[in-house]
Image (tube, helix red, strand yellow):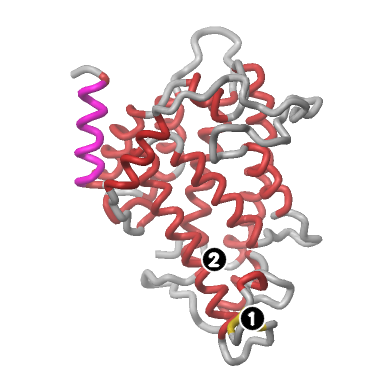
Amino acid sequence: MGVKGKAALAIVVLFMFLGSLWLQGSLDYHWDSCLKNYKQLNKLYDLSNRSEGAWSEDGLPLGECHGQAFQVGKLLTHLLEAQTTTTNDVLMQPYLASWDELILFMEALGPMVGLISQEIDTKTSIIRQLALAELESPEAEVEAVGGRADPGALFSGGSAYLSVRSMIRTELGRGLVDFDRQNDSGCRTLLRLHRALLWLQLFLEKLGETPAEGRLKSPSELCRQAYHSTLAHHHTWFVRRAADLAFIAMPERGFFYRLMCVQNQAEASVVLSRVVRALGDVYDRTEVALEENHMLDLP
């Protein structure tokens, strides 16, 4: 079977088996979204679409990368902002904003990976809804707009969902975290995002590596390796097989260069090294907070 045949089979198998098991949630399949992502995948971007003067001395694009939704500069900014607390904590608003940018990144890779991004978007929405419900509770002392809690204060200084640690502390104190059964607590939802973040971190790290000799591995192969080192440990056999087939349809390196506004592997390595380092810092802080509260194995 050729690559195109395998890619077609991947779509069928993905729809059959990935379902609600990716990130142990439920994937909503919307054909309109698939078609939109397919068109986005096939849109050709000019390699010179980066802004003049938008590059720092080490090669990181700081300005807007024209012609696309995903902006690697914004991703890095959000990741760094998430770490600005004085303690070993992660601020929730920039953390979720980082995921918003990563979702755009995944959607740009086509309908297969776009389906995964839909599930991740559902997870980030759960935490935002929990923060909103907290603001609108009778006990909350927040500024109101039109008689309702101001959405701009979702993750303000007084919010229980200001940071990863404040959310953990609040939900544990209220008995909202179930260590035996699945529920939609912020902590369980965060754990699913946390696992997915490690997958993307490892994938981008591998994508930025330049071997001393030999060929560059395809993004499809690298993504598969990253997946089996991370998320695959939490998935069933059927989901693992479906994921393997899904990654076959991933674009080649040239597409990733355009997505990051770089022209070659050397430039990509510089950009990705900083992004991966920031992803790792956020991941490590979250890992420590979850581990300290025995939440790395929530059902």
Is 210 placed left or right of 31 in the picture?
Answer: right
Q: Residues within 10 Å of mark 2 (few under 14, many from 20)?
A: few
Q: Which residue is mark 1?
A: 145
Percent from the top left, x then y, of residue 191?
50, 59
Is 12 placed left or right of 81 in the picture?
Answer: left
Quarter of the image for residue 179 reads bottom left
User: Which residue range is magenta in the image?
Assistant: 4-16
Q: Which residue sits furthest front?
A: 146
The correct choice, above or below, for 244 with respect to 287 in the image is above
Identify the residue shown where x is 45% and y is 27%. 222
Q: Amino acid at mark 1?
A: Val
Which badge, 1 or 2, is on the more N-terminal residue?
1
Q: Quadrant of the N terminus?
A: top left
Identify the residue shown where x is 42% and y is 45%. 231
Percent from the top left, x then y, of residue 253?
49, 21
Task: Measure the C-alpha gap from mark 1 to mark 2.
Answer: 38 Å
Q: Quadrant of the C terminus?
A: bottom left
Q: Secondary structure at mark 1?
A: strand
Q: Residues within 10 Å of mark 1 (few under 14, many from 20)?
A: few
